[in-house]
Image: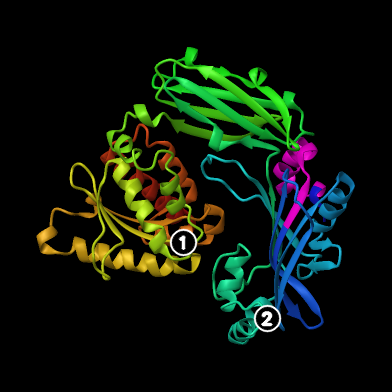
Amino acid sequence: MNFSTNPNASEFLDALSRWIDGISSINVRYVAVRSGEEWLINSAVVTLGPRRFAKKTIEEIQTTNVRVGTIQKNVGRRELDSFLNKVCRGTISLGQIRYSLPDTRKLAFFSPDQSSEPSYFLTKLQIRSVADTRVASLIAVKTTNAELRILDKPFDGLTDVLSFFGFPAENKLWDMHEIMLELHPPADFDHEKTQLENDKLNVSILKHPNFPRSQVALGLRLLPNPSLDRRSQLGKKIKWKASNGLDVGKLDLSVEDTVAAELLLSLNGLSVSRYFFSDRRRSLNPRLKHYAKYDPDLKALRSSLYTSSKESRFFEPGIGALAYLMGFTPLKPPLTDAPDFLLETKTGRLILVECTTKTSDIRTKAGKLVDRRFLLMNDASSSDLGNERVLAVLVVNLPRSQIMDEANFLAQNDVLLLTREGIDRLLNDLEMPTDTDTVFDQAKQRLQEKRSALSGLLQ
């Protein structure tokens, strides 16, 4: 089986063909497990992108039964084609490194579903072994952890080594064996130099030099009042200049009566980014305006919301701040047996929030939400808080594609899931936030639709 004969790979293939001129490197992260004399891929992430590395890098941590590593390498077109032909057959082969999925005759291809459009579009393709194997689940985790702790470069067990190489920090391996291909675009915004201030819009784009300038499209939408005359295509107005191995595109515009702007970047007809930003000095959201005095570019807020730490205490302050900026009244109880947050709408309806950065915590957190919602709704002194006035939400700062298996479980337990994509949308809407009670109603409706869809499948 290969890419060209599998319809599930068509979206990835199309993007690859359109952006092939802007690919210069391969970045591979992998976990391999021993099966007799063979080493099999348990999980691998292969990133194709425009960035050139200063040098080839190979790092690998080895124990008796587990290997975790990374390879970073610049490639030309011929080597890239050869590499991808092997990947589509379930094998990663670069130099002396060669690992394969179990039984490469039985592979399935999937394009991860995006239920809503993200702020940043990343084309992905999963290649999964459907062979009946449980190799990874038979690995003795306790023994592997002990070996990792006595290496010359020690790691505190699987959780530590997986996190170090960019995998979910879990003290286990995965039953499913798969390779994830990720295609990064050959151009993107330089966010540090793209800004709006006092009716002056400055845009900066960094582009791979081999990707044609003529294929860069840049849409603009100005707010408030995004009427037709405040919408335009600006790709042909970008001024390009070669700098340090890249093409740098610049655009400076005068825009009247503008509080916020959305830039729509597309490359050869494919969406790359929906970048929404605002002039913090002229915010329509008074809470945001005051907060921006201390965190002008929301860097601290974003750092908390997108933390790579597996400890939710680094994540929770960002969720509390985001809720406040949306207009909620947030309360973080100084208790252990309570939700991470209680959010109150303008009319007194309540949202119980639990936060996590780990997939392994999802079901435990969901159970806590169910118990705490039951306690609240069955308290005689809270008789006004019926089911229609209480909502349970689990916030996970991971992409939805990483936790799709848990989404149905949460809906069955009447818990709404908010993932990284949802956090992106809420951040983008801060300039003109939706009324908190409307947010509550919309969330309730989404949850009901999800439960109804599940009910239909189970009948």
Looking at the picture, does residue 338 appear above or below residue 17? below
Which element is circle 2 on?
loop
Cα distance in 3D space between marks 2 and 1: 29 Å
Q: Name the image quarter holding residue 280.
A: top left
Mark 2 or mark 1, which has the lower sequence index? Answer: 2
Residue appearing at x 28%, y 33% in the figure: 286
Which circle marks residue 303 in the picture?
A: none
Three-letter residue code for mark 2: Asp
Residue at 65%, 82% in the rendered image: 139
Q: Residues within 10 Å of mark 2 (few under 14, many from 20)?
A: few
The answer to if 19 sits in the magenta stretch is: yes
> Which x, y percent locates residue 287?
28, 38
Q: Kindly identify which residue carries mark 2.
A: 152
Q: Is mark 1 on a helix, strand or loop?
A: loop
Residue at left 60%, top 41%? 121
Give x and y (percent) for residue 19: 75, 37
Judging from the image, the colouring scheme is rainbow
The answer to whether residue 322 is left or right of residue 202 is left
Q: For residue 256, which quarter of the picture?
A: top left
In the figure, residue 240 lies in which quadrant? top right
- Residue at which label 1 appears: 357
Magenta stretch: give its range.
4-27
Residue 277 visible in the snapshot:
yes
Which residue in the rendered view is the most extreme toward the front? 244
Label 1 crowd (10 A; few <14 / some 14-19 / many >=20): many
Would residue 6 appear left or right of 395 to someone viewing this image? Answer: right
